[in-house]
Image (tube, rainbow, N blue to C red):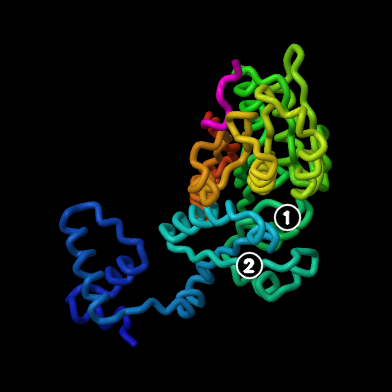
């Protein structure tokens, strides 16, 4: 195995300097120092140098591993999660850390007894979406370097999440300006008053939309249920869907069923009625790019979460103030102005 001493000997550069360069601690502020960095990195590559992470972990008491904690259903049922993971990966890699998915099975109290928590194998954890506030708090007590994405709790530091209320509010206002008089809102779990045991997104989206769309004579019908229930609703209320009606999918999973139901009833989105989603997904949009929607920068959310984690581990907590990310309203061809 090629060592730092081998590289130092073959280049005539001190061991300390080689160590700093290969461990990413050499600043390279001048042209001479940048040339030195390039020479050392090139020589290390030619010699086949590979960092000994086990030795580094023993020396620094750092594994350089960041655990990504999420439910299996979140990754399996919501393809949008992969966009966030890509952003996290970019920031962590740039900071010299390695992301690892910590738990995909049902996350519960017993998860805290697993080896990865019990033996403190992680430098930090990033907790995502449908993990309960109580369990997230317990995890952060074991591993204090903790960043939370889209969790119910929004603490002053180390939290980043989508502003779902603003997404609903913005869509409601824009649709009202376009002349829509009736909105049919589809979601599985949507109550105006949030249930503390449920994820904040559903209630926030609905309450925001109702506030934005309500106006003189406007009507909002909320349809709660599973994706298959959309077909039953359309069968029963087909004649009530007119040009000034907009069908609102709370998120991409409802959108899939809604598009299929429209097709099955020979209704044209943007012609016979409006259709909009309050959350989009890159894969679906590749085949339906002109969909009217609220779009969240999920990759950017992940990137910022990764940056928070790196800053936190480097002792710069003041740079980790919590933020809410607003979505962007995109008026596609599926919500034309109503005559």
- Which residue is at the front of the view, 162 or 282? 282
Q: Which mark is residue 131?
A: 1
Dividing the picture into quadrants, the one containing residue 117 is bottom right
| Residue 291 falls inside the magenta stretch | no
Kindly identify which residue carries mark 2: 102
Q: Position of residue 71 (x, y in %)?
A: 70, 61
Between discs 1 and 2, the one toward the N terminus: 2
Where is residue 273, by image quadrant?
A: top right
Instruction: Inspect this view and state whether residue 312 appears.
Output: no
Residue 336 is inside the magenta segment: yes
* Residue at screen point 77% across, 50% down: 228
Residue 175 sits above or below residue 293 on the image: above
Mark 1, secondary structure of its residue = loop
Nearer to us in this view, 271 or 114? 271
Percent position of residue 287, x then y = 50, 47
Residue 67, x across and y down, in percent: 59, 64
Residue plotted at (76% across, 37% down): 203
Q: Which mark is residue 85?
A: none
Is residue 215 visible in this depiction of the protein?
A: yes
Q: CA distance from mark 1 to mark 2?
A: 13 Å
Q: Is residue 246 above or below residue 85?
A: above
The quarter holding residue 280 reads top right
Which of the pair 162/261 is nearer the observer?
Answer: 261
User: On the rendered image, what quadrant is the C terminus found in?
Assistant: top right
- Drawn side of residue 198 relative to residue 120, left or right: right
Name the spot of residue 268 as percent of width and height, x first. Answer: 61, 35
Q: Is residue 106 left or right of residue 57?
A: right
Q: Secondary structure at mark 2?
A: strand
In the picture provided, is 248 more to the left or to the right than 235?
Answer: left
Overall secondary structure of the magenta stretch? loop
- Mark 1, Cα crowd under 10 Å, few <14 / some 14-19 / many 20+, is many
User: Which image quarter is the N terminus in?
Assistant: bottom left
């Amino acid at each position: 195995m090629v060592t730092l001493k081998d590289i130092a000997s073959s280049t005539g550069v001190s061991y300390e300097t080689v160590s700093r360069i290969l461990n990413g601690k050499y600043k390279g502020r001048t042209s001479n120092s940048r040339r030195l960095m390039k020479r050392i990195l090139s020589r290390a590559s030619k010699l086949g140098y590979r960092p000994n992470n086990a030795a580094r972990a023993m020396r620094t008491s750092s594994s350089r591993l960041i655990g990504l904690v999420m439910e299996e259903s979140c990754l399996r049922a919501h393809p949008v999660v992969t966009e966030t993971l890509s952003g996290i990966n970019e920031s962590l890699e740039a900071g010299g850390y390695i992301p690892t998915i910590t738990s995909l099975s049902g996350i519960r109290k017993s998860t805290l007894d697993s080896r990865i928590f019990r033996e403190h194998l992680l430098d930090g954890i990033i907790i995502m979406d449908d993990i309960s506030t109580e369990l997230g708090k317990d995890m952060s007590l074991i591993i204090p370097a903790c960043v939370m994405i889209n969790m119910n709790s929004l603490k002053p530091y180390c939290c980043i999440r989508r502003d779902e209320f603003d997404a609903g509010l913005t869509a409601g206002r824009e649709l009202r300006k376009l002349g829509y008089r009736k909105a049919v809102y589809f979601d599985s779990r949507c109550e105006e008053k949030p249930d503390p045991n449920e994820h904040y997104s559903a209630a926030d989206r609905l309450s925001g939309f109702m506030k934005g769309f309500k106006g003189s004579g406007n009507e909002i019908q909320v349809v709660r249920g599973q994706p298959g229930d959309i077909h039953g609703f359309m069968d029963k209320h087909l004649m009530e869907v007119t040009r000034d009606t907009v069908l609102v999918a709370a998120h991409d999973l409802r959108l899939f069923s809604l598009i299929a139901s429209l097709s099955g009833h020979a209704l044209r989105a943007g012609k016979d009625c409006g259709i909009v989603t309050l959350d989009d997904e890159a894969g679906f949009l590749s085949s339906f790019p002109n969909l009217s929607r609220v779009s969240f920068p999920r990759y950017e959310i992940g990137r910022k979460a990764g940056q928070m984690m790196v800053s936190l581990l480097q002792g710069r907590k003041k740079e980790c103030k919590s933020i809410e990310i607003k979505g962007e309203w995109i008026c596609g061809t599926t919500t034309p102005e109503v005559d």
